[in-house]
Structure formats: structure tokens, C-alpha cells
Image (cartoon, rainbow, N blue to C red):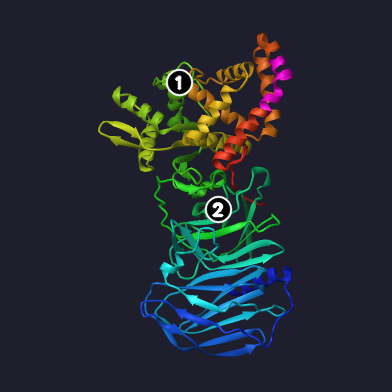
Amino acid sequence: MNKFFSALFFLILFFAIFSCNRSEEKSPPINLDVRGMRAETLSISGKEQLGPTHVLYNLERVYRVNTHNPVFFRAEIERSEGPYIFSVHTSEWAREIEFIAVNKKTVIYFTVSGPCEIKAFSIRVSENSSRYFSGNITMPLLEEVRIIGRDDFAEGFVISHNSVSQSENFKNTISDNKNSFIFDLDGYFDTRLLSHIIIEVNPRPLNQIRWIYVNFYTGTIRNTIRAFPVQGRVTITATDLSEIIPGFRQGVTKADTIVTVNSSDNTNIFNRISLVRNPVDTSPLIGLEADLGTILNYRMERWRQRDFELFTWTIFPEFLFMDLINYRYQELMFKRLAFFVEKAGFAGTLLTHAEMDGLHGWNAHNYKADDLCNFFNLARRTNFKLTEEEELLIVILQKNNIIKKEGDIFVPIKGGILTIAREATPALRRTFLNHEGYHGVFFTMEEFREKSWEIWNNISPNKQRFWEIFLSHREYDITNEYLLVNEVMAFHLQQTPERGRDYFNRQIAALRRDYPEERHFFDNLRANYFEEFFQTSIAYANALFALTGLPPGNLVLIERVR
């Protein structure tokens, strides 16, 4: 793997342009300060020129690290004109920190864990590179590292809640004003399994956002994804990685994989890249945190249940996302709920199987926690017999902290549940995924709900009438204004505003055929209000992005590049 890492590193160097102005005879002194309880000062006994671009700095006396807790280091280079390799040499090992920067101050952070003895430090640069080093390298304590500002980029460290913890060692390449980052998923000092990769970039307006490309190299295999930054952030979970990297199994193994991160943007957009190692609960009835793109394509042979798999949505983890094996199983668990919550003429009632026979439910579902509680509480209060699948749903919702039992009743905690089924065609599955996902946003964000109501109230009366006919035709209970506004929003956002032009044109034509007595209304709608559909879609898209950072028409934020 080291050979692969080296080859990958020098391949990147091949494309970088570095200055040839290098000073052979001058290598600046490095002052080492240890700030700790003993206030000990390390000093250099001398330097050895191991080559024209490699200097070894020996310590006057060995510095002992007697604890397993990490000692934090900070190295700063004021102006960098080429690739550098900074190394710490101990009695047990030598560790290298490799980085490249062009015309910018570079700060790297790293740790040494004991027990070991620090004997020397070295710096080497590649041929044809200038050497501009700052005057000193310090080893502050953890408390001093915490003074790093939130806007500072600390390679290899996670900064959150005003504290700093080690993430991983990175190699940062900056060339032609673009940044690439290279790192090894297995890490150096932390044996816990990887739970998240977090990539932070400068937030941009929707029309200026560039996809982030992440390459995963495992042996000779490369797998590439593109990711959409939401409010300047890309989160790749262990579940996502299990679908990207061959042999990666969350909670079971680690993969010997090197990762490169870059953007098609021609400016330096990256703020921070962090690797997080937290425990991941993979219990059979607990949702696996994932992007909706992973949920859409998650391999069924890896399902933990025969008939369904459970996920939580990375962006809104309070929502459980269930992918079901087919429509039949989905009906056993959710059809009665559909009639109870949303169906015209049936809302608020519990139907028997005989009463539902021959009636269509939905091919995808969305229910918030309080509606779920109302359904199960009425069933308990009236001794209504639920299916085994509906009883299992109660258990799932409780285990995932969506509802809870207090005395004899269920009460909501947060979020809700969204579903799709494998029986749908790939195109329909993606549409259903988007549609139900936007409902999740509506349920979760009060500001977005308020904005959706505002948009609805500003729609012209004729267009509001279209939506009442459209949703009634699909058997929605339009007397429920909350449901009405929620559905209008989701049908607008399930595709981009541009694609919405064709979508609404088709729907108007279809309704004109189904309601011939209303043909003049639909002709007038197409002639005089068609542009308003587009402008309404734009209004929803702008509100969505401003409040959440999500794009319209696509909630698949992590997608494999084939």
C-alpha cells in the first residue's frame, strides 16, 4: 500500500509546477519548544545534510513521551514553493507528514503517542523546489491547540464546540489554485472504525455550486463518487462507504483504501476535511445513516431483514427511511395508514381488509410522528386488530426514537417515516425518493413550512383550483390544508423547475382528457397560466435552498460515477 501511496503522490506531483529557485547552502535552524508541566526546552544539537534537499535535525537530548495520550505538534511554513516532507523520528518509528502548497502559508498538525523517545526531526523537499521554512516548530499542549480558530484549516484535526481532536493525517496538494487532499482511511493512531468523512467547502449560490469528486483507491480498483455540498458540507457515512469500497463493512472491518478529494472548481474552495470515528449501531431494527443515493441503490443481499431495510437520512436523521421488497409487503405495513392520514372520504378512520379490498393505497409513503401516534392510539383504544407488519412498525418506530409509549398511549418524539419499494421502476423509485424526501423537509423545518404556505397563498385562484382537481383526482383529502400545501410543494420540487415545464404540461393534458366538461378551464390554464407553474417552482426551489442548502429535483447527493 505504501508503494501505491508513493506512486499516487508522485503522479500528482507530475502535474504540479514548482519553482526551481532552491537554496542549497542554507537550511534554516529549527527551534523546538516544549511547553508542559516541566517547561522543558528542547534544543538542536546539530543538523546533518543528508542530501541537497534533506536535512536531519538531531536533538541535544532525547525527549521521552511516557504517556499513551498524544503530544500535539504544530509545524508552520510561511511560504511554500514545492512539496515538503516533515518527519518525526522516534526510538520506535519514523513518521512522515507529506504536503504540497504553492504560495500560501501552510500549517500542519500531528501527534506523537508514547511510550517512545523523540530523537530527531527532518525536513526534505523534492528536487527543483525552493525551501522557505518558518523559524520554529513548536509542540504545544492540547489546551494550546484549542486556540485554533474555527476559520483556520487544521489538516488532520476536527474542530468542533471549541475543542480539537485528532482526525487523520492528510497530504494536501495545491496546484493551479486547486486543492486536492489525499489520505488513508485506516488512519495512524486510532483503531476505531470509521463512521464519517466530512468535507467542508465555501458555501456558494445554487447556480455556482460544483460537485465534489472523491476517488477511493483499494489496490488497483478505483471507485469514484460525486457529492453535492449542502450548506458547504458533504457527509459520507460508513453505510455510504460500504456501497463504494469493496470489502468495507461497517462495524466489521476496515479497508486498506487511499482517498483523493478534488473539485472541478478552479479556485481553492476547501475549508476542512475530517474523518470521524464514532460507534455505529448496526442492530437489525436500527436505521443505518446514509445518503438517499445509497438508499436508492443499496444491495438487497446486504439487507438485514428479508422484506425491508431501514435507514436514517444523513441530512435529516430524525426521519427513518424504509425500503421495502415489494408493493404487497408495503401495503401490509402502510396501506391502512394511507387511508387514515391522507385518503379522501376515509381520513381519521380505521378500515378493515375487506373495506380496503380493491382500493389503491400509495406506492410510496410519508408520515410524521404525531399522525403515527394518532393511528396506533385509535387502534389500541378501539381494540382494532392490526397486521403483524403494523405491530412490527410500532417496535421499529420506538427503537428509532420516533414515538414512545407513555402509560397506555403513544406520544411523538420527533421526525417520522418515509418509504419506497423495490417493485417500482428505477426512474419511478428516484421520483418517489425525491417526492417523499421533500415531505420530510416540510415535516422537519417550520420555516420551510411557513414559506410553502406563503407560496401557496400567492398562487392565483385558477391555479389553486388546478391543484384541487389534480390532488382530488389522485384521491388526496384536500379538505386537509396541511396535506394540500405539503403535496403541492412536493409535486413542484420532485423535479427541477425546467423539467417541471414538461411535467405540468402533461398533467394539464391528462386532466383535460379525464374531465372533458372542464376542457375550457384547462385550455385557459395552459394558455395564460403555464408560466406561473414555472415561477412557482422557482419560488419553492429558492426557498428550499435558502433554508436548507438542498437543490430542487435531486436529493441523491452522493452518486457513483460509472
Classify residue 426 by image quadrant.
top right
Which residue of the protein is positioned furthest toward the top in this rendering? 517
User: Which kind of residue does numbered mark 1 sit on?
Assistant: Met
79 or 349, which lies in front?
Answer: 79
Q: Position of residue 101 (x, y in %)?
A: 65, 69
* Mark 1: secondary structure: helix
Classify residue 430 by image quadrant.
top right
Q: Is residue 344 above or below residue 228?
A: above
Please check the rendered image and state whether residue 525 is part of the magenta-colored stretch, yes or no.
yes
Please check the rendered image and state whether residue 295 is part of the magenta-colored stretch, yes or no.
no
Q: Position of residue 547 (x, y in %)?
A: 55, 39
Q: Which mark is residue 243?
A: 2
Tell me what residue is drawn at x 69 percent, y 86 percent.
Answer: 24
* Mark 2: secondary structure: helix
Chief secondary structure of the magenta span? helix
Tell me what residue is drawn at x 73 percent, y 68 percent.
Answer: 15
Which residue of the protein is positioned furthest toward the left in this rendering? 407
Q: Is residue 309 above or below residue 84?
A: above
- 518 displayed left or right of 325: right
Q: From the image, which quarter does the N terminus lie in?
A: bottom right
Tell me what residue is drawn at x 39 percent, y 50 percent.
Answer: 283
Q: Earlier in the sequence, mark 2 or mark 1?
A: 2
Q: Which residues are magenta?
A: 522-534
The residue where tag 1 is placed is: 356
Q: CA distance from mark 2 to mark 1?
A: 38 Å
Residue 545, visible in the rendered structure: yes
Q: Which mark is residue 329?
A: none
Q: Is residue 26 above or below residue 317?
A: below
- 457 displayed left or right of 338: right
Q: Position of residue 137 (x, y in %)?
A: 52, 77
Q: Position of residue 273 (x, y in %)?
A: 55, 59
